[in-house]
Image (tube, helix red, strand yellow):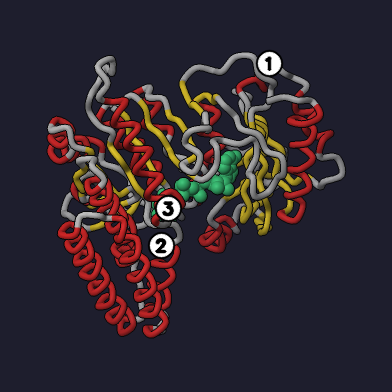
């Protein structure tokens, strides 16, 4: 059985959903072939209609700021868009039912918007309740669309399939409870030869309070569901051909990476390759389930990227480069304390206390530099460390992460990488002992030219792929 996850652009409009139906039909036909090892499935996981989550979060913010009229305008626009897409459901009774469901959900949202306008405060719990509507609606529409096109599908409310902690806006799955919920609510559908359709990104606590797994979390939902149900493959259908050698929005002439190891994919996702949510690979690794990234607008031609435990053979040292912006560098220096026992622990305790995770760390004799993604609590961390060190921060920084299992056996790579970006001021460099990646921290304004030069050198000039 396979799990197929369709991202926002893959369910954005009528045309996209038509393509989705054709892709699912082909997978269903493959599952029921006599030679197929398993006639169940697929399980379909969908994101909200492209752009819907941004709009839902945007209107929540508007309502919280007192702009109830602006928020209501967005509610109306989203309602219209969902009703338009529901036209894909050919069967009239089923379509009417789904249209009623859409109206009810938006009526509810309208009431919430009114209440938030009075309260003038949007708590993370409200944000989750509002954002979750995107996937709840899209999954309901897609389930009915598949059924009306002759594929027996059943809608599964994600709040009854994914059990999470109560950490609103970034909840973590509760594995035992989720496995139990899936065997109660999804296994019987598979056994009855139906195609379960679940909204990604969304879950609920043990008490049934709606949560979300964090932005981009539908990939993670698909992987969690795949691991719990023992899927043979987790497919991520998106708007690009697979994992590319660099972010196509930043670099020209990027190429497809046909095969990646789990470890490489995790590093790339963590350091900014948005095509995969960073946590997606974890459940796949635990159960050794291959992950495949595929292009939903070119299902026939696309070979996609296959991600497996094995390290792909016969490749250059560098597999791909990931990058992210909006990084903050914090420098902590103390001539007095650095060599003292427990100094590093003291520093990291403060980051932990203020729930700020650190990505890249470099140390010198008198200073420690760290990068963080979320700088909101830096003022508190700086104040807490002020009695033991001088602490400064620098915003608008970027990380470039060069990733490849082959870097382990190419000791000269780091030199060539630094040569490629010669002239670009480098703030930090880090190469881990496992040497699967080399990370550079530079100013945001230098990112595009630095990436272009690295890409040119390793994927065009030297021809590595
Ligand atoms: P979905 O809505 O299908 O989940 P996302 O927008 O989350 O899609 O992820 C796909 C996007 O990720 C691509 O359109 C591309 O712009 C971006 N991206 C960034 N880095 C990479 C990379 N190395 N390879 C492929 N895509 C990347
Ligand atoms: N719809 C959610 C988001 O935009 C989750 C996802 O698409 O993965 O973040
Ligand atoms: Mg995504």
Residue 374 pos. (x, y %): 53, 55
* Residue closest to the eye, 105 or 402: 105
Question: Which of the image's four quarters has the C terminus?
Answer: top right
**Ligand 2 near label 2 (Cβ, under 8 Å)?**
yes
* Residue closest to the eye, 264 or 434: 264
Q: CA distance from mark 3 to mark 1?
A: 47 Å
Query: Mark 1 = which residue?
Result: 409
Image disc number at residue 172 = none
Which residue: 41% across, 62% down?
52
Which residue: 20% across, 64% down?
101
Asked whether the beta carbons under mark 2 and mark 1 sit within 8 Å of each other, the answer is no
Give left or right: position of 195 versus 415.
left
Give left or right: position of 73 versus 452.
left
Residue 19 pos. (x, y %): 41, 45
Image disc number at residue 52 = 2
Query: Mark 3 = which residue?
Result: 15
Give left or right: position of 102 versus 74.
left
Measured along the vertical axis of the image, is residue 155 above or below residue 234? below
Q: CA distance from mark 3 to mark 2?
A: 17 Å
Q: Secondary structure at mark 2?
A: helix
* Residue closest to the eye, 382 or 326: 326
């Amino acid at each position: 059985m396979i799990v197929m996850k369709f991202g926002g652009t893959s369910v954005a409009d009528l045309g996209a959903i038509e393509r989705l139906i054709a892709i699912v039909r082909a997978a269903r036909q493959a599952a029921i072939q006599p030679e197929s090892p398993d006639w169940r499935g697929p399980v379909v996981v969908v994101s909200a209609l492209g752009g819907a989550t941004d709009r839902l979060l945007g209107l929540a913010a508007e309502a919280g700021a007192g702009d109830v009229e602006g928020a209501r305008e967005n509610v109306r626009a989203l309602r219209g868009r969902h009703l338009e897409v529901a036209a894909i459901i050919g069967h009239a009774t089923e379509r009417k039912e789904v249209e009623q469901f859409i109206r009810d959900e938006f009526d509810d949202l309208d009431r919430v918007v009114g209440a938030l306008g009075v309260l003038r405060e949007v708590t993370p719990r409200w944000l989750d309740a509002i954002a979750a509507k995107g996937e709840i609606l899209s999954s309901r529409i897609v389930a009915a669309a598949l059924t009306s096109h002759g594929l027996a599908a059943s809608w599964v409310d994600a709040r009854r399939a994914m059990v999470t902690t109560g950490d609103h806006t970034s909840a973590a799955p509760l594995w035992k409870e989720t496995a139990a919920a899936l065997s109660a609510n999804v296994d019987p559908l598979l056994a009855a030869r139906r195609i379960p359709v679940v909204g990604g990104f969304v879950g609920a606590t043990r008490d049934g309070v709606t949560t979300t797994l964090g932005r981009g979390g539908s990939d993670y939902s698909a992987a969690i569901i795949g691991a719990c149900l023992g899927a043979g493959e987790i497919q991520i259908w998106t708007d690009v051909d697979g994992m590319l050698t660099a972010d196509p929005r930043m670099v020209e002439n990027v190429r497809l990476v046909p095969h990646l190891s789990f470890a490489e994919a995790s590093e790339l996702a963590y350091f900014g390759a948005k095509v995969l949510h960073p946590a997606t690979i974890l459940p796949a690794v635990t159960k050794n389930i291959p992950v495949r990234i595929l292009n939903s607008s070119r299902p026939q031609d696309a070979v996609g990227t296959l991600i497996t435990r094995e390290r792909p053979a016969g490749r250059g040292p560098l597999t791909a480069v990931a990058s992210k912006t909006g990084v903050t560098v914090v420098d902590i220096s103390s001539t007095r304390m650095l060599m003292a026992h427990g100094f590093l622990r003291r520093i990291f305790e403060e980051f932990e206390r203020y729930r700020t995770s650190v990505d890249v760390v470099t140390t010198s004799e008198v200073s420690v530099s760290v990068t963080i993604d979320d700088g909101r609590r830096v003022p508190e961390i700086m104040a807490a460390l002020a009695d033991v060190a001088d602490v400064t921060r620098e915003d608008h920084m970027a990380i470039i992460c060069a990733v490849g299992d082959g870097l382990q056996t190419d000791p000269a790579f780091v030199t060539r990488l630094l040569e490629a970006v010669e002239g670009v001021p480098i703030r930090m460099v880090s190469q881990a002992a496992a040497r699967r990646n080399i990370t550079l921290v530079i100013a945001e304004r230098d990112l595009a030219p630095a990436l272009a030069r690295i890409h040119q050198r390793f994927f065009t000039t030297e021809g590595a792929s």
